[in-house]
Image: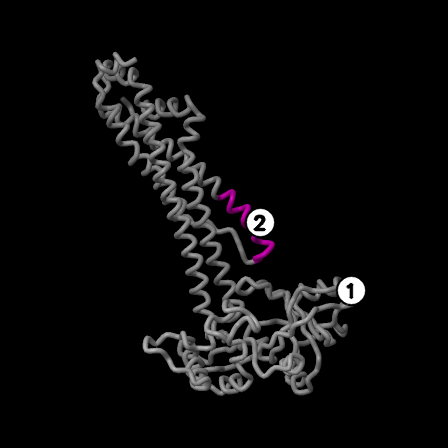
Amino acid sequence: MLFRDTVNIAIRAVTANRSRALLTMLGIIIAVGAVILMASIGKSMEGVILDQVSILGPRTIAIWPGNKGPEGGSGTMNPDYDKLTVNDVDAIEKLPTIAGISPVIFVTGKVSYGSETSDTRAGGSTPDIYEIQNIELQEGRLHDENDEKDVRAVAVLGTDTALDLFGNQNPLGKRIDIGEQKFTVIGVLKPAGSAFFQNMDERILVPFSVAKITMQRSYVDMIAAVSATDDLEYAAEDVSYLLRKRHKITLPDDGGTDNDDFLVRTAAQAQDILGAVSLGLTFFITMIAGISLVVGGIGIMNIMLVAVTERTREIGLRKALGAKQKDILRQFLVEAVMLTFLGGLFGLLIGIGINLLIVGIAHKFLTAYIFKLNTFAIVLSVVMAAVTGLAFGIYPARKAASLNPIEALRYE
């Protein structure tokens, strides 16, 4: 029997009962769709993570109070909320491994202009923050050392905050309320997108000296620094050593950081953490997809066994007319592979379609999220679907090929 004839017979067998064929392929469709979806999301998120980190600059070092950093809670929810002091900032600034530093104190209170309000939080920081975080000006000016020295109540707005408060009006020179304090708007920043999944365009920057007086603080909420060397790990360890010495912290015997009352993170470490989360999620869903492939394969094997039973007389007739064992074996294997291959193609289309839908939704929250297909995952998933059909189709095919033609013809 020619291979072309075998394929034609397989097509007729699959299309003869379309509902059953579709249900048989369902496990494969789900598995391949999940693989394509998660692999593409993983590749897209990889691009987002790299973009998030690049916004802050490759030499950025962030220092938070508490050994869990922002995950340990904000404000007084963090038991070590007051451990990073202004004196710590001055000491870190003198380190030879640090090229620039900017402490941050968050100014609490409702942000408003007349009847308009904005759901944002103001941060008091020194002018170095603009260089450390690659912040660019769109109009007006940035606050400078003179504003710090004279404790001027001025504010620089992110683009979204300016739009929320002023709409199409020019915000420069207008006075906004942050809590009980009035601030004069002196500048608007260029759109910056998001960094670590926070909208950087929804922010207000005010002089550090003003924030310190307004909040009546001698401690800071975080410190942004930039390394003077390409070896960020060395610079981060330098900062950690200094803070442990100042805070009289003794390292445990295992060399861990459990005793620290602060957390130092570099941009590279943050990227690794976010990447690990993305990889873990992708691995988990891929594992589920693998289980779905096995379940789908078992479903195909069962359906093929039913098909063998239903077509026993047909098999007997083919053998009586001269069909060999290998012809029957090949016929049923081709049918099994065809089912899984078609399931793989349907899963591929569904996975891409859902991914495109996710991209449309994600763009509203993460402008950096773009559609990326993982070509390797596409090829691998479709090939694995076909291999699944081959693997789980062997037993039914061998059973069909081994039937005795005389007994098969007598089968009712």
- Considering only vertical position in the picture, is 24 above or below 189? above
Q: Which quadrant: the C terminus?
A: top left
Kind of residue indicated by mark 1 = Ser
Residue at the image point whose x is 43% and y is 69% from the top? 269
Q: Position of residue 222 (x, y in %)?
A: 54, 76
Residue at the image point whose x is 74% and y is 62% from the top? 167
Residue at the image point whose x is 37% and y is 48% from the top? 287
Quarter-wise, where is residue 191 in the image? Answer: bottom right
Magenta residues? 352-367
Residue 215 vs residue 389: left or right?
right
Q: Position of residue 31 (x, y in %)?
A: 41, 41
Residue found at the far right of this picture: 114
Tell me the mark number nearer the camera, choosing from 2 and 1. 1
Residue 336 vs residue 351: left or right?
left
Q: Secondary structure at mark 1?
A: loop
Kind of residue indicated by mark 2 = Gly
Residue marked by disc 1? 115
Q: Which quadrant: the N terminus?
A: top left
Q: Position of residue 234 (x, y in %)?
A: 40, 78
Label for residue 360?
A: 2
Residue at the image point whose x is 46% and y is 62% from the top? 274
Q: Secondary structure at mark 2?
A: helix
- Does label 2 or label 1 sit earlier along the sequence? 1
Which secondary structure type mostly characterizes the magenta part of the structure?
helix
- Considering only vertical position in the picture, is 173 above or below 44? below
